[in-house]
Structures are given as C-alpha cells and as structure tokens.
Amino acid sequence: MSKDETLGEALRRQGISRRGFLKFCAATASMMALPPGMVPAIAAALEKARRPSVIWLSFQECTGCTESLTRSHSPTVEGLIFDAISLDYHHTLQAASGTAAEAAREAAMEENYGKYILVVDGSIPLGNPGFSTIAGISNQSMLMETAKGAAAIISVGTCAAYGGIPHASPNPTGAVSVSDLIKDKPIINVPGCPPIPVVITGVLAHFLTFGAIPELDELGRPKAFYGKSIHDRCYRRPFYDKGLFAETFDDEGAKKGWCLYKLGCKGPTTYNACATTKWNEGTSFPIEAGHPCLGCSEPDFWDGGGFYKALSMPTEDITRTAVYAVGAGAAAGVALGAMNRARKKRAEKAHEKVTIDDLEKGS
Amino acid sequence: MIDTEMLKVEAGENLTYNVQPLLHEIRHALATLLDDGGNTVIDLRSLPLAPGEEQKLLDELGQGEVYARLHALGPSEIVETRYPGVWVVVHYNSSDEVIGKFIEVCDIPGLLRSQQEDIRQGLEQLQTQLA
C-alpha cells in the first residue's frame, strides 16, 4: 500500500468487498469502545484515512507489550490496521539491525517529519546512559531525537507510561517515563503489564480514524478504555456489595466465585477495560480465573504494598453497612475507596525494598 | 494429582443481574422499531457479564427463522432470534476467533443487504464477461 493511497482504496485493491469493509468498521468501533451507532461515521473516516508512519522504540522493557500486540487476533481485523499503518521501525519485529535499522528510522523521520506517530514501550534510564542502549545510542537521546518530529506519542505499557517495574523502589537505573522527559507533545498513555491487545490497536485505530488523540483522563489514559475501575465493571461486584468475600484461595467463598477483595484485589483502585473487553478473544480475565487484580495499569503498582494484601480490610461495621446498603450501596464503596487511596499512598511511602523477610510475612 | 472439583467456580444464578435489564432494553428497542423504524445495536463486548450470563441471554432469545452465514473478511453469523426483529450478529476473523458480538434490533441487519459499491463492481464484471 503506497502512502498516498487511502485505506478504502487499499482494501478494494485487495479485493475486500464493501460488506467486508463494513464488518471491519463494526469490529473497529467495538475495539475503540465506541457506540455501534458510530459505525457509519467511522466507515466514512476510515475510507479516506491515509496510512501514517509509525516508529516504535523499545527501551527498558521485557517485550511483553509487543508479544501482547502481535497476538491481537491476527491476521484479519487488527492485521488490517497494520496494513493501514506503515510500521517503519520496530527493532524487535524488523529484519534489519544495527546501522541499517537506524538508517530506516532516520529516513522515516525525515520523510514524515511532524506527521509520524511515535510508539514507545519501556522506561528510560537516567542513572547511566550505558544501562540501556540501541546501536550505541542511549535510550534518552534516541527518545528526545525521535520525539521532535512526532505528531503524537503513544506510551505503550506501564513502563513507558509511568516507569513500571524498572522504576520500582529502589529504582536502580533511575528509570523514568516518557512523560517525565517530553513535555511539548501530545502523549497517550496505554498502561498495563502488558496492555490488552485490542486497547493498543484501538488507540492506533482511533488516531487513524479521527486523526486526533482520544479523550484522556488525568493520568493521560484514553477514557474509552480506562474510564471505569475494574471493581465497578466486575461481575463479582454484587458479592462485594453483599459483603461476601473469599478468605483463602480454596475456601467455600473462592469456590463460589465470591469477591477477591480480601485476597488483595486491586480492582477498586485500578482503571482498565479487563472486566468487559477481557483477554484471549474475550475469554476471561484474572478475576474470572479466580485471581485478584494486581493493578498493573496504575502508576507504581509494583510498590503498592503486596499483591495479596487487601487494600484495606473492611471492618465488620463496613461489611454490615454494605449488606444493609445494597440499594444505595455506593456510599460504602466511596468510603472504602478513600481508605484504599490513603493506604496505597502510605504503602508507597513506607516501601523501601522487599526482603525475604517481607515476602515471608506476606499477606 | 489435582482435584479439579476443587478448582471449579460456581456461576451463581443471576450473578450480575444484567440479563433481565438487557431483555428489557431489547423490548424497548423493539417498540421503537415498530413506532418509528429506529434501529438499535447493543455491543455485547462492552457489558460486564458473569461466566454463563451471555449464554443465558442468548438462550432466552432463542433461534428464529433466519440463519445466515457471511464470508467477508472471515465468517460472520447473522441469526434472527425467536423474536422477529431481534438479531444476533457474531463476526469472526479468518482464524475463527470472535472479533465482535452484537444484538441488532432492526428489520434486516445492514450487512445482509447487497452494497452499492459491490453491485456496481459486479455489474462491471458481468459486462466484461459478456463483452
């Protein structure tokens, strides 16, 4: 597909019927968490969309975000999104390496200056430039240089968005997020460890469709995917409201699928689409599989005081209030939410480093 | 050896209570369709449903007179439920993975119609063949 061809033209050239295109638009709307009524508008916009150049930089990361992305229902609908963008540099996926790869990046930058989308996964070490380099270039200087000509930056994964695991206390590499370094570009944070694949492609599709960045929350995340807490969208929420909790991983409550709050679920303080979009083609998500949410799409989730420690233990009073307040149950939730945030802050402050002793004390 | 019985999580009856409200939403949508021909589409991927609840909803809706299977960018199933005007539309990609699941309340889902662009292209092909 040449850069001047529109997506509509490219799909017709590939022999895809109008019906196929409309199906693609319906799936894309669902992927972007937009109401189905918007499909005609999306079809009209995508028809005319031109293929943007995308440069993908990977810094201090585990490649989990790329792994997630490359497993996003390929090879059709999201695959087409990739036909619809020009992924000009991705050092894990491209064949070229070293100087040749860097030449491709520089060529893409020059050709599309001011127009390309920069995707970043991984955090950037400031402690010592030698901690992480690509073709001898430090992560920081590669980011600063590549960001200059970008139309927008998408920080994929919690490391790029908030520093993630490299940033966890005591942060040995001095890791920072993209938004810590870049202040003069629109930045979309797509956190998660890794993010849900369709959320990554959904954000790309949004940019492709509307040529603009989606509405963001105060942490820079698209509201369409991160607007509601896991807890508010959790199918186990009715158990929380009734005060029915699993106390261990193999008690009656666990078998009956009760709320995992007391087992450390971070659902109440975590904003992500897992509870509705789910994982593996919408099969399930951690809570459905019986495991508490780790809160991986929140800043500093690694230092939140322990994955299996409850945010704050509901006292008997609160449980009773919750039982009585099933009808108007929101109030109890608000009170707990406030306690949770305070607790999370305290835990972050108090947390220096994890010792074997800490782990043994556990939850 | 793991006792798999122990790992089984029971799906409670009416766990999220979302099935009944959805059926009511569909009832309202059907009334609107009769009143002014307005169509409604519900994206099932955007709703919190407990394991088994989606199936419960689909069972409630049942199967009616029409079952259509498309082949455009992978298969799609378009099924009229036992309530005429209520359709379940499921899109798959070419690896048979579900990429979208919708309930459409309308007289006929748009995708079943032949599309102008495709008709025009077909006409051109037929003309070329006859020339």
Image (cartoon, rainbow, N blue to C red):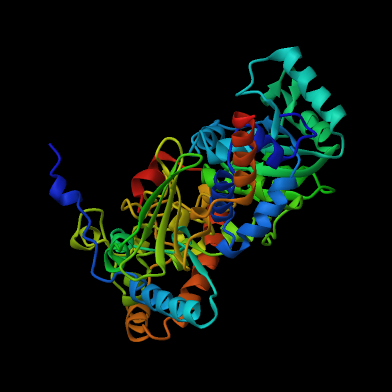
Q: Is residue A171 left or right of residue B90?
A: right
On the image, the x and y values in percent for residue A98 come to 71, 14
Where's the C terminus of chain A, which quadrant?
bottom left
Q: Is residue A35 left or right of residue A359?
A: right
Q: Is residue A81 visible?
A: yes
Identify which residue, B87 or A126, lies in the foreground: B87
Identify which residue, A27 or B15, lies in the foreground: A27
Identify which residue, A145 or A36, lies in the foreground: A36
Residue plotted at (60% across, 44% down) = B118
- Above or below, comparing residue A244 to residue A124 in the picture: below
- Above or below, comparing residue B20 to residue B57 in the picture: below
Residue plotted at (58% across, 55% down) = A29
Identify which residue, A127 or A332, lies in the foreground: A332
Where's the N terminus of chain A, which quadrant?
top right
Q: Is residue A185 left or right of residue A218?
A: right
Residue plotted at (37% across, 48% down) = A283
